[in-house]
Amino acid sequence: MRDGGCRQRASLKVTVPAGVAAGVLASLIALPAASASVVQTTGRATLVATAPAPYAIAPGFNVPGIYGSAISAIPAVQLAAQQGTPVVRPLGQLHPADLLVIAPQMLPATALAAISRLPRVSAADLLDAARLEGNGHYVATLGVSPSTFRAFAARPTAESDVLWQNVADGGIAVSYLMGQQKQLPLGGSVTVAGVQTEQLQVGGFGTVGISGVDAVVSDQVARSLGFPVGNAIVISAPHARLSTLIGQVAHLLPKNASVAPLVAQAAERGLPGATGSAGAISITASSGPGLTVAQTEAFLAAALSRVGLPYVWGGAGPNVFDCSGLVQWSMRQAGIVMPRVAVDQAQTGPQVPVADLQPGDLLFYHTDPTAPTYISHVAIYLGNGLMLQAPEPGEDVQIVPAAFGAGFAGAVRVYPRVAAAVAGNIAG
């Protein structure tokens, strides 16, 4: 959030369960130059606080990245062509990514062809997958054939000829948020450590739209870094019943391989409804219940206790956070297991109409111009039109008016059983 230089004071009023009031009050008073008081009612407490910017946000504030973020092209620079690297083929038909197969070592040579022949599978691509250390952070990375894999990426990223040629020429493409928030230099070098350590040029910022994946290199670079060879397959089957297809795919794989739905893609097609299925995730009344009163109180108290702590990309607590790291850490204090990234957290319960929001519900946003339907930001609803969030680098965990305008993707009420199932998904 940016306050546009505004430094006036403003009032915030939050109604919470009475058991949470003391912790909330302490958090609000801890803000620089802030004051707060509590009005007690039966079983409830209303906290009234005043605070200076950046905690007091002027009307018309924006969720980070939503406004003024439109880009005419994927951020990329033309890297020097490398001798012997292939020319990337033009983009053909896009293939929504629905399932991800991952094994600890190379998959059988017959697996890709057998999966491709399954009914309702429209496309599949063989990948190398590993977690690498890049500039001090562990990042889920794919080694790909740029000509074929680009069709499985989010459309703006898929359409960037420059980005994919840079990957083919030995560069690395990173997600838009990672590139911007880590201030990586386009055309500059980053240190990437696998079995081997190499300096790779940053060829572009483009989110592929697969949950948790923040970097892509060519399969040749992946193998020089020591990736397992051919240990993953991405599958597109937009008209398949995924529960049935998962069983069919698993039958073709060794026992140590895993297959899971890409809940990121389910989120792109829409947040889950109150009942029924949203792509990969099926939520019914039996998936509940939601958080208990005690769990909600513990969750909110934990989140509010982090107000004023700094945002750091990839931060998961206890003293630095990104948006989804704050949600995951705060839920953990209440005994709730949550997935790590926002797009997966959006699949942890039924969608809630704005008119029915309750404290503890999660609010989701589209903030990434390179994958405009991908959920990339999450905030915690506090009640009375306020939300708590970890916004962006240079700012701290803060309480601000809830935003329901451009970029708002929807709200979800967390069901612990569903959250644990999504958190255990290999694709997340």
Image (cartoon, rainbow, N blue to C red):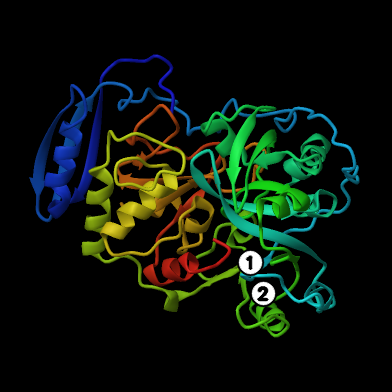
Q: For the image shown, how many numbered marks are present on the structure?
A: 2
Q: Position of residue 379 (x, y in %)?
A: 41, 45
Q: Which residue is mark 1?
A: 279
Question: Residue 253 versus residue 273: which sits nearer the camera?
Answer: 253
Q: Earlier in the sequence, mark 2 or mark 1?
A: 2
Q: Is residue 148 left or right of residue 34?
A: right
Q: Quadrant of residue 419?
A: bottom left
In front: 221, or 23? Answer: 221
* Residue 214 located left or right of residue 381: right
x and y percentages locating residue 85 in the rendered image: 87, 43
Is residue 357 something one can see in this rendering? no
Extreme front residue here?
196
* Amino acid type, callout 2: Leu
Quarter occupied by the C terminus:
bottom right
Q: Nearer the viewer, mark 2 or mark 1?
A: 2
Q: Amino acid at mark 1?
A: Gly
Asked if the residues shown at circle 2 and circle 1 are in contact, with their CB atoms under 8 angstroms apart, the answer is yes
Viewport quadrant of the N terminus: top left
Disc sitting over residue 242 in the figure? 2
* C-alpha separation, residue under disc 2 versus residue under disc 1: 8 Å
Query: Is residue 250 depicted above or below 94 in this figure?
Result: below
